[in-house]
Image: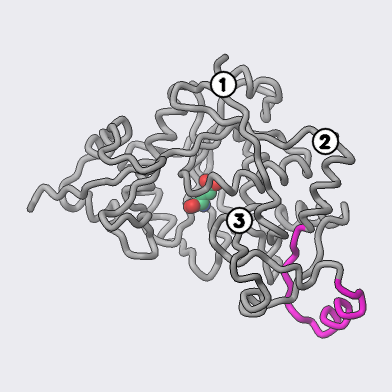
């Protein structure tokens, strides 16, 4: 069964055209890993006869910069990728995410958490981590005495809003039955399969950060829905996040896109490439004479050393 017939069951846009997205965070310039991800998206968009949208995930105001967003668009254009619709900048839509958080709050599923990162780390059990490796939130402000909460609110203390995971999961059972939540995954040949998801391993995730800023999970789910995204193609590092995304989609009544998580490029030291760690940006490769076709060749390339779903890219430099 082709994937299109799965997504047609609940076409998010009312039409049948597939919609994919690139969702870079403008915290630096693109590196080769982003280029690979972009080109894998292009390939799927072509296979599906769909559109590839661009969304700037620039909600982290401390780390994102408009000049990086401009540079990313320029690097993508060099790769031959131009947005078919206006680029969505998340930083221009904070009210939309606040409304989505409000809906979850009205369902009684959120609670304010005043704890600092340090307090959480100190209180967390040493061996309990979320799939990102962060200490699992030990529930410091869950079911807290209302007077404690009111006192903090009255003092104007900043707070995050967290999802009460246990309540959210039982809300889902009450409203939608006890069929376990799953995601549709598709492979290179667009063959779909159902994958079980388990959001509980994330604990009480943050939905709205201090200062009324949306968390990544909330913003991504809201935007995939309002942009009518039918197919999410992104790196394998985001696979575990899909569990939270599926839960939020189900709670908010959003359609579920189908997912493909592709292999990552690692540096020679086995680390994931990272803008922040200063890995060679695409711009530097461009300056050294690498052509878009060289990058495109990576997409179909057989992994040289396969370790789980990750390949090593042996850096090539024509001038050495
Ligand atoms: N903004 C995320 C990143 O740059 C990608 C989010 C997504 O594809 O869901 O890692």
**CB of residue at label 3: within 8 Å of ligand 1?**
yes
Q: Are marks 3 and 1 in contact (CB under 8 Å)?
A: no
Tag 3: Cα neighbours inside 10 Å, few (<14), some, or many (≥20)? Answer: some
Is the residue marked 2 within 8 Å of ligand 1, measured from its CB?
A: no
Can you name the residue that lies furthest to the bottom here?
A: 155
Numbered badge on residue 3:
1
Give the quarter of the image for residue 259. Answer: top right
Using the image as rendered, state which of residue 204 and residue 48 is in the foreground.
204
Residue 216, numbered label: 3
How far is the residue under mark 1 from the one under mark 2?
Answer: 25 Å
CB under 8 Å between discs 2 and 3: no
- Magenta range is 144-163
Q: Nearer the viewer, mark 1 or mark 2?
A: 2
Judging depth in this view, the residue of 50 and 272 nearest the camera is 272
Q: Which residue position holds label 2? A: 178
SS at badge 3: helix
Q: Quick one: 90 or 173, which is closer to the camera? A: 173
Task: Looking at the image, tell me whether mark 1 or mark 2 is earlier in sequence order.
Answer: 1
Going by the image, does 263 lie left or right of 258?
left
**Place of residue 133 in the rendered image (x, y in percent of width and height, measured from the top left):** 54, 61
Compare marks 3 and 1 and give the one earlier in the sequence: 1
Q: CA distance from mark 3 to mark 1?
A: 27 Å
Mark 1 and ligand 1: say if the CB distance to the nearest ligand atom is below 8 Å.
no
Residue found at x 58% / y 60% = 59
Question: Is there any visible trace of residue 55 in the rendered image?
Answer: no
Residue 68 image offset from top left, x and y in percent: 41, 59
**Magenta stretch containing residue 125, yes or no?**
no
Q: Nearer the viewer, mark 2 or mark 3?
A: 2
Q: Is residue 26 left or right of residue 36?
A: right
Q: Is 276 located above or below residue 32 in the figure?
A: below
Q: Secondary structure at mark 1?
A: helix
């Amino acid at each position: 069964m082709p994937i299109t017939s799965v997504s047609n069951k609940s076409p998010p846009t009312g039409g049948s055209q597939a919609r994919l997205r690139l969702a870079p965070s403008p915290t630096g310039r693109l590196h080769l890993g982003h280029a690979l991800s972009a080109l894998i998206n292009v390939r799927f968009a072509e296979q599906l006869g769909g559109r590839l949208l661009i969304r700037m995930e620039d909600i982290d105001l401390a780390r994102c910069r408009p000049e990086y967003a401009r540079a990313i668009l320029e690097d993508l254009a060099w790769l031959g990728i131009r947005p078919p619709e206006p680029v969505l900048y998340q930083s221009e839509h904070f009210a939309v995410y606040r409304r989505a958080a409000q809906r979850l709050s009205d369902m009684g599923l959120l609670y304010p958490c005043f704890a600092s990162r340090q307090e959480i780390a100190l209180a967390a059990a040493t061996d309990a981590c979320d799939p990102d490796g962060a200490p699992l939130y030990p529930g410091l402000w869950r079911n807290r005495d209302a007077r404690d909460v009111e006192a903090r609110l009255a003092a104007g203390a900043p707070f995050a809003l967290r999802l009460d995971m246990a309540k959210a999961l039982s809300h889902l059972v009450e409203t939608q039955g006890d069929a376990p939540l799953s995601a549709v995954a598709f492979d290179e040949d667009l063959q779909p399969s159902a994958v079980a998801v388990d959001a509980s391993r994330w604990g009480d995730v943050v939905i709205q950060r201090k200062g009324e800023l949306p968390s990544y999970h909330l913003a991504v789910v809201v935007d995939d829905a309002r942009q009518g995204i039918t197919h999410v193609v992104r790196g394998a590092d985001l696979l575990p996040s899909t569990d939270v995304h599926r839960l939020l989609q189900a709670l908010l009544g959003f359609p579920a896109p189908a997912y493909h998580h592709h292999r990552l490029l690692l540096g020679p030291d086995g680390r994931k490439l990272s803008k922040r760690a200063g890995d060679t940006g695409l711009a530097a490769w461009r300056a050294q004479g690498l052509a878009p076709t060289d990058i495109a060749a990576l997409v179909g390339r057989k992994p040289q050393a396969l370790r789980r779903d990750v390949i090593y890219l042996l850096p090539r430099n024509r001038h050495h």
